[in-house]
Amino acid sequence: MHSDLARQPVPRTWSAVDDAEVVTVTVDGQEIQAPKGMLLIEAAERHGVYIPRFCWHNRMKPVAMCRMCMVQVEGMRGLPTACTVPIADGMKVDTQGELVQKAQDGVLEFLLINHPLDCPVCDRGGECPLQDQTLIFGPGESRFVEEKRHYEKPIALSSLVLLDRERCVQCARCTRFGEEISGDPLIDFVERSGRTQVLTFPEQPFSSYFSGNTVQICPVGALTAAPYRFRARPWDLQASESTCTLCSVGCRMEVQSSSDRVVRHLGVDSDAVNHSWLCDKGRFGFEFLSDPDRLTTSLVKDGASFRDASWPDALDMTASRLAAAQDRVGVLGGARGTNESAYALARFARDVLGTADIDCQLGDGLPASFVAGIPSERRASINDLERARCVLVVGPDLKEELPVLFLRVRRAATALGATLVEVHPRDTGLTLVAGEVIRHRPGEAASVLDQLAGDAPDNRLNGAHAALRSGPAVVIVGRQNLAEDPAPLCAAALRLVESLPEARLLPVLRRGNAHGAIDVGCAPDVGPGRQPPPSRGRDAAEILTAAADGELDALVLVGSNPLADFPDTDLALAALDRVGFLVALDLFLTDSVREADVVFPTVGYAEQDGTVTNLEGRVTRLRARVTPPGRAIPDWAVIDQLARRLGHDLGFESAEAIGRAMVSGLPSWKGMRPWRLGRGQAHDGQLLGEGTLRYPPEAAGPPTAPAFDAYGVRVLTGRALYDNGDQVSRCPSLSRLAPSAHVALHPRELTRLGLADGDDVVLRNGKATLTLPARSDPGTPEGVGYIPFPHAAPLISVGEAVTEARLETVS
Amino acid sequence: MTTQILHARLKAHPDSHTVERSLATGGYTALRRALQEMSPQKVMEEVKASGILGRGGADFGTGMKWESIPAGSFPRYVVVNADEGEPGTFKDRELIERDPHQLIEGIALTCFAVDAEKAFIYCRGEFRLGHARLAQAIAEATERGFLGRDILGSGRNIEIVLHRGAGAYVCGEETALLSSLEGYRGEPRLRPPHPTVAGLYAKPTVVNNVETLSNVPWIVNNGGAAYAALGTERSKGNRIFSLSGCVNRPGNYEVELGTPFRDLIYNHGGGIRDGNDIKFFVPGGGSAPWYGPDRLDLPLDMAEVKANGSMLGSGAVMVADSEVCAVRSALNLVRFFDHESCGQCTPCREGCGWMTQILTRIEEGTGRAVDLDLLLDVSDNIAPQWRWGQWPYLMTTICYVGPSASVAAVSAVTMFREEFEQHVTERGCPLRREHARAQ
């Protein structure tokens, strides 16, 4: 733990600061202007003067340990470090004087004397700040003739990150990241003097969800990532700036490939979204692209198995079956691809198939009309967290489902002084930094929010009630529990926000492009462009129910796996079993795709151009970096071909053409310039505008949960970051990190049952009986049983307000 | 004989550490007087009037430090630096072991003056006896109402927390001490903010040395003016000097500031062993630049010593005679600073280790002719442009540990370049060889 962080200034998100006084300082004779208080090293860099550094990072507090950024400032004695000097008007700075150059030479020589100089076999060689800064600022040769320091190299800090202590320059970027940014300080310095080294604590691996960031910010090759080690040389890499699609935060990232294979993701520093950070799922979640099981050709069911089919055959067969089904077709999907594919799918369903039964969610999100129906003046952006005095989170464990949003919320609470109010049935990743923690039983969040909206809350809510009224507030609403109906919560959140003059709402869904797909109309209750739909269609639960009841003749799955993702697996199975014709577009032969009659191979995020929309409605680019395998083509291209065979020319011959159609056809896309995103003004993407759809705050009545059964538990289920989803399970580095099935119960609950941690426990309700190992967890209150999804699926019945189960011992 | 302020009790009584002896010899009268007759402002004024400068080595005005606590900011803390580790220094150890009540009374008075309710003593880990005596003295003082709640019926609370260090020289640096006290690694912090503004737990904190605070009871009893009457124009009062090295009577001597070094070494210290000549001496602890015998008539006066390119520092005077090897002495000091470097900043972490290796080589007789200038240049990269005879120095580091190694190396090479060259050309120490021949 660094001893000085409590006293150092918090790095600001300058684009979110609108009231800074601008001052003029002179750097090497050149006058520059920058906001008062900006650190000299940052102000100089923004004006083209690069002051060398190792320990300073623009997203972390300065510690001035490496001593590389020493400069001379008129009126200050000696050699102050540019990373700790805030600029003030009239300051005169010399970054290249004789004294400075000698000191820089000295520091670089010191850093190199014990550095192994094994650059030829170092991942960092060629893109190494130590190499680069030695070239520009260093002495050129070493006078060190002694034996260098030696350590065992490398050592594994976790299954993802390896450490070479010989290369380390002790800048503390990695250790400070854990402490300051991600809040899991699992690595730290041990020993002192020349023996100072970074290590994990005994018996505790570096099992952080954000560990890969330390590899990216390491200024040498001391930290390396197992999935990238020795895979490529930096000068062989081809890179495209793109967007992460593994969740809906939409982190900006650079996709790098070598020999037409994605080998690395690097976070791109975006003020608006991810501050350069990525979670490990996003960073290492590229391995599935080159999985040998990728679909490469279209398939047609032949008896119990598939046979390869030509594109024309498969398309013809599908078109004729869909035509025969007429409007008795349901469409599931759209959330895992691009906006362009989602728009093509929405148009295909409504204009070609003539059905409004389309849903990009699988009963695991929020009502789409809630997500799309929030007026602009009440919709929060991620950067609103920079100004918020209060942040209320009522949703999933953000650390598990939307990790980089978790980092931004954590920053608001720990560095920016906002009061974090957590409304959740059990401890989450944010609990430790929350100022107000409101625990409630599953199914009762809506009544908590209604109390907070009112004038006289329960005593235990007083702190949160006051915090919400202390200034600008951001209310983050997501699917708190897959085992309950989310509609009452959404309506209550809207009522809460409307009761507060300075509050904004940020509805969050998990799946990569769910927000984009809803916006363009892949939802039964939202028309394209955040408009009210001409007629309300059936949602995923209703579509599956109808299919299981034989009311639908065909189902279209586009990057959609109901058997894995729909909370009620039994219903999904019945639907896929019963429906007459099932066509799937996907990367893999997933459980659901295996049930299909025709399968089309499609492409992944790094194999196509297009745009995606994140949870705040920010549209950013996706760029093709590698060639898709075999005959895989984008979803929209398959859809366009099917439409043509069904007699409709949608005019969708390229992603750009679809983009143009969206800009001209969708109210929320008015003024968007998707082909310019990522450049100039639109560097951080563009926020969508609003449509005319409004979600009625009275849409859902008070929660209708039954009285709590004191002999059982209410089931809480949500996803863990590594969840054995279709993509993660095909990333070898990540799949082994998925938690095993268990039910977390309060220790007293176990005592009552006479069970020990790890013993099997039986959960029984009207629908199913489930036996799971019990995990003793003081963070889960009595009366709650937490089961990571999908292991809770058998207990869940769609349409129930909550899911309850009795606990029994194994007889 | 100088008036004994600090040593009065402990030199006269073998049981000087007990509360009984303390009370019998005027202990806690100053505290009683302050609480009953004086305001906190008055105590602070007396300490300011005394002109006493901190005895830890930085020579900062104690009254000024107390005054710079921002008004209205609470809680605030008093931290006692009892992590005496400067090479050659052993004065605080004696004050702690043999008159802990004098220190505790000084702490209580300081808390009263700056309006603090809690004080911490950061005691050097190796001081086992000192720690035990402090613990006992705190218990005794609490039992008798000098500490704790509502002390002497004044309505004031003062609590002292005794913390034992774990063996790091750098924790004697006040900000590293605060880091360590908070439970972090003992690493110095950046300034600003200064501890008086954001110190322990980021609250206003006065950090004072043991000897400094041990003076406070006398100052309160006798008045700041009486203290200021002692010493010189710019260095008021008495100081304890830890005299060590090749002297006949090493030990702690409390002398009035302004006394010449010669008097300290030859009268108090009884001169040099075997009647030898002084080769060099270190006037203020291992971090101070060395002096040759030509400086023996300088007064023990902080300003005078600074004007002559060194510092009185922690008050440790180490004397080396003609039989001492300058290379070996420099190596001994540099190796110490390397061992004690916290490893936080680059020049100290890497530079001290490198200098140690170069000096070892020269000392062992495998040095090269280029090593002398290399040593000077490596030193220069830690304390840029520092030349022997100048004070103070610039530094590329966060704290003074790294530059202290440079100071030792540059002092030695500048003063005894010929001896260093002999080590290289003769492949070893000429003194050792001479010594062997004489045997």
Image: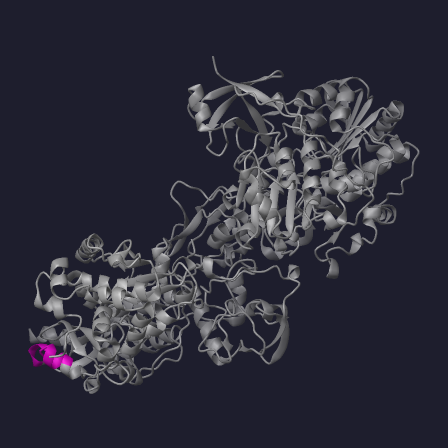
Give how far across and how far down residue B275 sits, in percent: 8, 81
Whether residue B269 appears in magenta in the rendering, the answer is yes
Vertical placement of residue A460 versus A162, above or below: above
Q: Is residue A602 visible?
A: no
Give how far across and how far down residue A246 sits, in percent: 65, 41
* Residue pictured at 50% horizontal, 77% vertical: A72
User: Which quadrant would residue B167 be assigned to in this image?
Assistant: bottom left
User: Which quadrant would residue A573 be assigned to in this image?
Assistant: top right
Left or right of residue B242, residue A764 in this image: right
Which of A298 and A712 lies nearest the eye of the viewer? A712
Vertical placement of residue A424 versus B403, above or below: above
Q: Quadrant of the N terminus of chain B?
A: bottom left
Which of A400 and A414 lies nearest the eye of the viewer? A414
Q: Is residue A621 visible?
A: yes
Where does the magenta region start and end?
Answer: B264-275
Give how far across and how far down residue A367 sits, in percent: 73, 34
Left or right of residue A809, residue B231 in this image: left
Give how far across and how far down residue A506 sits, in percent: 68, 45
Q: Quadrant of the C terminus of chain B?
A: bottom left
Vertical placement of residue B183 versus A439, above or below: below
Colour pattern of the rendering: one colour
Number of numbered tags placed on the structure image: 0
Which of A599 and A276 lies nearest the eye of the viewer? A276
Which of B410 and A128 lies nearest the eye of the viewer? B410
Whether residue A94 appears in magenta in the rendering, the answer is no
> Which residue is the extreme one toward the right?
A647
Vertical placement of residue A143 versus A6, above or below: below
Q: What is the chief secondary structure element of the magenta stretch? A: helix
Left or right of residue A667, residue A594 in this image: left
Left or right of residue B306, residue A455 in this image: right
